[in-house]
Image (spheres, helix red, strand yellow):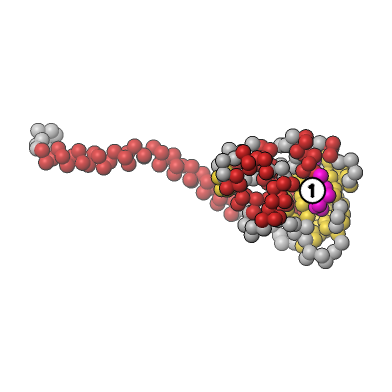
C-alpha cells in the first residue's frame, strides 16, 4: 500500500510508463523556458524597430542610371539621428561619374554617417541630396549570413560564372576557397564564426563587386586585411569602379580626390 493505492503489478507498470513519458519533457523544460525568454527579448526588439517612424521618402532624390554626369550631389545638407542634436551640418559634396573620393578625418567626425546619408539612412533636416544610379555598400563590420559562401557573394543575383570567377580573383579568395573542405559550397556558421576577419571582409567586398552597382561606398574596407591584400583590393576598386571611401589609413591614397571630414563639416 502506497499513499492509499494498492501496489499491484498493473499500477506499478502504468506508473513506470507514465514516468518514462514525462522524463524527456521534464528534462527539456529548463531549456524551453530559457528559449521562451530569449524569444520574448527578440520579439520586443522587433516590435521596437517596427514602431519607429519611417524615413521620409524625400531624403534622397534618386535619379535613373545615366541621366546625369554627377553620381552624388549634396548641397547645404544637414542631417541628424536626433533633431535635437545635429550630426552633420552644412555638408557640400559633388562626386562626378568616374571619380574616386576618399573621406578622411578623426574618429567621430562623421565619416561613416556621411555614407549613411548617401544611403538614405539618416533623417535629413534640410538641403538637397541627389544620387544617380545604383549603390553597393561595404560596412566596417562585415555582415555575413548563415549559408554557403557562394550564396553570400551572389546575394540573390543569378550566377554568371565568368564574372563570379573574376570577382573571386579580384578579392583574393581563390586560395582561401582551395583550403576550405567544400570550397565556395562551404557552409558558414552564424555571423561567419568559422571565418577569419579578413575572409569575412573580402567576402563582403566580393558581394558588393558582384552587384555591378554604379556607386560603391566603402567604409574602412581594408582594416581587417593585411597590407599586401589591402593594396591589391584597393587597386582593383581603384581602376575598375567609381567609389567613395572612408578610410583611417591614408597609405593607399596617393592620387585621388580627398575630402576632409572635420567637426561634422565638409
From the top left corner, tell me how far across and down residue 133 is, in percent.
Answer: 77, 61
Q: Which residue is mark 1?
A: 237
Q: Quadrant of residue 94?
A: bottom right
Write the start and end of the magenta stretch as one range: 235-247
Tell me the quarter of the picture where residue 229 sits.
Answer: top right
- State left or right for residue 117 relative to residue 195: right
At mark 1, the secondary structure is helix
Q: In the image, residue 220 lies at what x, y percent?
A: 76, 41
241 part of magenta stretch = yes
Residue positioned 60% across, 51% down in the render: 151
Is 100 left or right of 30, judged from the image as shown? right
Instruction: Give the x, y percent position of residue 92.
Output: 87, 52
Q: Is residue 49 left or right of residue 219?
A: left
User: What residue do we see at 20% from left, 38% from top?
Assistant: 16
Residue 66 versus residue 235: which sits nearer the camera?
235
Observer-nearest residue: 62 or 139? 139
Which residue is at the front of the view, 37 or 200? Answer: 200
Residue at 67%, 58% in the rendered image:
160
Tell me residue 104's x, y (percent). 84, 41
Q: Which residue is rendered at x = 22% and y = 42% of the image?
A: 18
Q: Is residue 158 visible?
A: yes
Quadrant of residue 252 in the image? top right
Amino acid at each position: 500500500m502506497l499513499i492509499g493505492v494498492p501496489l499491484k503489478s498493473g499500477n506499478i507498470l502504468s506508473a513506470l510508463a507514465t514516468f518514462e513519458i514525462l522524463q524527456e519533457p521534464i528534462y527539456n523544460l529548463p531549456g524551453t523556458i530559457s528559449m521562451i525568454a530569449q524569444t520574448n527579448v527578440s520579439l520586443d526588439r522587433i516590435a521596437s524597430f517596427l514602431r519607429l517612424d519611417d524615413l521620409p521618402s524625400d531624403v534622397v532624390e534618386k535619379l535613373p542610371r545615366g541621366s546625369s554626369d554627377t553620381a552624388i550631389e549634396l548641397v547645404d545638407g544637414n542631417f541628424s539621428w536626433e533633431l535635437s542634436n545635429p550630426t552633420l551640418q552644412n555638408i557640400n559634396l559633388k562626386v562626378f561619374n568616374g571619380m574616386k573620393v576618399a573621406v578622411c578625418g578623426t574618429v567621430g567626425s562623421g565619416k561613416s554617417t556621411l555614407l549613411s546619408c548617401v544611403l538614405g539612412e539618416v533623417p535629413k533636416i534640410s538641403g538637397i541630396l541627389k544620387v544617380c544610379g545604383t549603390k553597393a555598400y561595404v560596412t566596417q563590420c562585415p555582415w555575413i549570413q548563415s549559408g554557403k559562401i557562394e550564396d553570400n557573394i551572389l546575394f540573390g543575383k543569378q550566377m554568371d560564372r565568368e564574372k563570379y570567377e573574376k570577382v573571386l580573383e579580384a578579392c583574393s579568395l581563390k586560395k582561401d576557397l582551395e583550403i576550405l573542405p567544400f570550397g565556395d559550397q562551404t557552409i558558414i556558421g552564424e555571423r561567419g564564426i568559422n571565418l577569419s576577419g579578413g575572409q569575412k571582409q573580402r567576402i563582403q567586398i566580393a558581394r558588393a563587386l558582384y552587384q555591378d552597382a554604379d556607386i560603391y561606398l566603402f567604409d574602412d574596407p581594408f582594416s581587417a586585411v593585411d597590407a599586401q591584400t589591402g593594396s591589391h583590393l584597393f587597386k582593383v576598386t581603384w581602376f575598375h569602379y567609381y567609389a567613395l571611401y572612408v578610410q583611417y589609413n591614408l597609405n593607399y591614397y596617393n592620387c585621388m580626390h580627398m575630402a576632409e571630414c572635420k567637426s561634422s563639416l565638409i
